[in-house]
């Protein structure tokens, strides 16, 4: 199979696009907006004042514990939003789905009264979530989503460590029966501490498209 193609367990063919610049901009923006942990100061060697982030071991006072709890809540909300937004980015701009049933939109509208989006990128996402991934078990949904996300990242030239981190995050957080959110959050914060390395793609890979989602 071509590097830029992924076949789902149901036999749907998904073309993976090169979205390196968009993914890089996404993480730069979301990482910049991440809440900052509360800090405490100590007097180090030579009388220098050192500032360190609070954690469960260093938070002693009620005020420090309250500040740390507030930060954890804000960080968890930010992680959840980042995950949601990244799925939207991948589903709307990072892939093209080959539609197996050309009448699916008419069926949804006539039989179920569903308004299928006319915008190509939104339609792409709608088809993926309702026809390709709809009805999967929570575990199957996690697995398929992780494969699609990591596939787009590989096509975008992202290094293996970054892809591995993100794949682990999605395997632990996507779907109704989410995995250990602390583990996912820790993995995401490890990723934030290092640069996202994007290697130029020498071969293959239709470029990530504009709003129309065509990838041309």
Image (cartoon, rainbow, N blue to C red):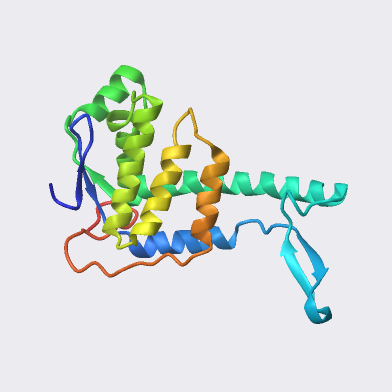
Considering every residue shown, the one lying at the far top of the view is: 111
Considering every residue shown, the one lying at the far front of the view is: 45
Considering every residue shown, the one lying at the far bottom of the view is: 46
Question: Horizontal and vertical percent for residue 17?
Answer: 26, 54
Is 136 situated above or below 190?
Answer: above
Q: State the residue in front, 50 or 204.
A: 50
Is 108 situated above or below 193?
Answer: above
Q: Residue at x 53, y 63 (%)?
A: 193
Q: Residue at x 42, y 45 (%)?
A: 168
Going by the image, does 4 lie left or right of 115? left
Going by the image, does 150 lie left or right of 48? left
Is 156 situated above or below 87?
Answer: below
Evaluate whether residue 117 shows in this view.
no
Pick the quarter of the image with the C terminus: bottom left
Q: State the residue in front, 183 or 37.
A: 183
Q: Residue at x 24, y 67 (%)?
A: 201
Question: Horizontal and vertical percent for residue 39?
Answer: 76, 61
Evaluate whether residue 81 shows in this view.
yes
Question: Horizontal and vertical percent for residue 74?
Answer: 67, 47
Q: Quadrant of residue 119?
A: top left
Q: Quadrant of residue 53?
A: bottom right
Q: State the residue in front, 21 or 104.
A: 21
Question: Horizontal and vertical percent for residue 73?
Answer: 68, 44
Q: How many marks?
A: 0
């Amino acid at each position: 199979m071509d590097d830029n193609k992924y076949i789902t367990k149901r036999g749907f063919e998904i073309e993976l696009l090169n979205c390196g610049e968009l993914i890089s901009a996404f993480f730069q923006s979301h990482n910049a907006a991440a809440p900052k942990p509360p800090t405490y100061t100590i007097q180090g060697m030579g009388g220098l004042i050192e500032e360190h982030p609070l954690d469960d071991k260093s938070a002693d006072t009620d005020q420090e514990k309250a500040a740390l709890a507030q930060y954890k809540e804000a960080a968890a909300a930010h992680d959840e939003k980042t995950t949601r937004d990244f799925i939207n980015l991948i589903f709307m701009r990072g892939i093209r789905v080959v539609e197996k049933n050309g009448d699916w939109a008419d069926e949804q509208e006539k039989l179920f009264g569903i308004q299928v989006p006319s915008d190509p990128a939104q339609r792409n996402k709608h088809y993926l979530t309702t026809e390709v991934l709809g009805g999967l078990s929570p575990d199957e949904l996690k697995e398929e989503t992780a494969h699609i996300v990591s596939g787009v990242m590989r096509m975008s030239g992202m290094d293996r460590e970054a892809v591995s981190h993100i794949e682990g995050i999605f395997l632990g957080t996507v779907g109704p029966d989410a995995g250990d959110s602390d583990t996912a959050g820790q993995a995401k914060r490890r990723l934030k501490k290092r640069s996202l390395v994007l290697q130029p793609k020498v071969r293959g890979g239709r470029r990530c498209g504009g709003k129309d989602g065509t990838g041309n």
